Amino acid sequence: MQELLNYSERRFRSKDGLMLQKGDVLKIFTSGGAGYGLAAERDPGLVRRDVAEGNLSDAAARTAYPHAF
């Protein structure tokens, strides 16, 4: 496995382009769906895991899932 040498972050417009080379890795994050069920019933451990993994900001988690903190 080759070590990541040039980490960079870029926001793309709705129509954009990017040239990739063989071996490049492109990671894309998109917004999720609305989910299902009541927020108050979400497992607190899963909420905290989402925060730890960067899938949800701490502020958003505390607003939407106060029972998890």
Image (cartoon, rainbow, N blue to C red):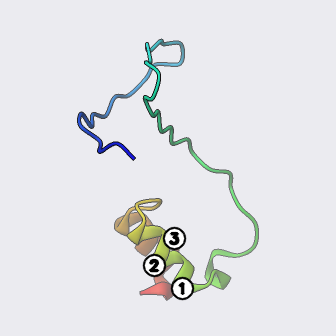
Give the spatial CA distance, label 1 vs label 2: 6 Å
How many residues crowd around disc 1 within 10 Å: few (fewer than 14), some, or many (20 or more)? some
Of the residues under marks 3 and 1, which one precedes in the sequence? 1
* Residue, disc 2: 48
Q: Amino acid type of disc 3?
A: Ala
Observer-nearest of 5 and 35: 5
Give the spatial CA distance, label 3 vs label 1: 11 Å
Observer-nearest of 53 and 62: 53
- Residue 7 in the image, given as x and y percentages of width and height: 27, 37
- Residue 58 in the image, given as x and y percentages of width and height: 36, 69
Q: Secondary structure at mark 1?
A: helix
Q: Amino acid type of disc 2?
A: Arg
* Residue, disc 3: 64
- Residue 44 in the image, given as x and y percentages of width and height: 54, 85
* Residue, disc 1: 44
Of the residues under marks 3 and 2, which one precedes in the sequence? 2
**Going 50% across and 87% down the picture, which residue do you hit?**
67
**Going 47% across and 12% down the picture, which residue do you hit?**
17
Q: Which marked residue is nearer to the observer: mark 3 or mark 2?
A: 2
User: Left or right: 1 with respect to 5?
Assistant: right
Q: Amino acid type of disc 1?
A: Pro
Residue 6 in which image quadrant: top left
Q: Which marked residue is nearer to the observer: mark 3 or mark 1?
A: 1
| Residue sticking out furthest to the left | 5
User: Left or right: 25 with respect to 31?
Assistant: left
Residue 60 to residue 6: above or below: below
Q: Which mark is residue 53?
A: none
Q: Secondary structure at mark 2?
A: helix
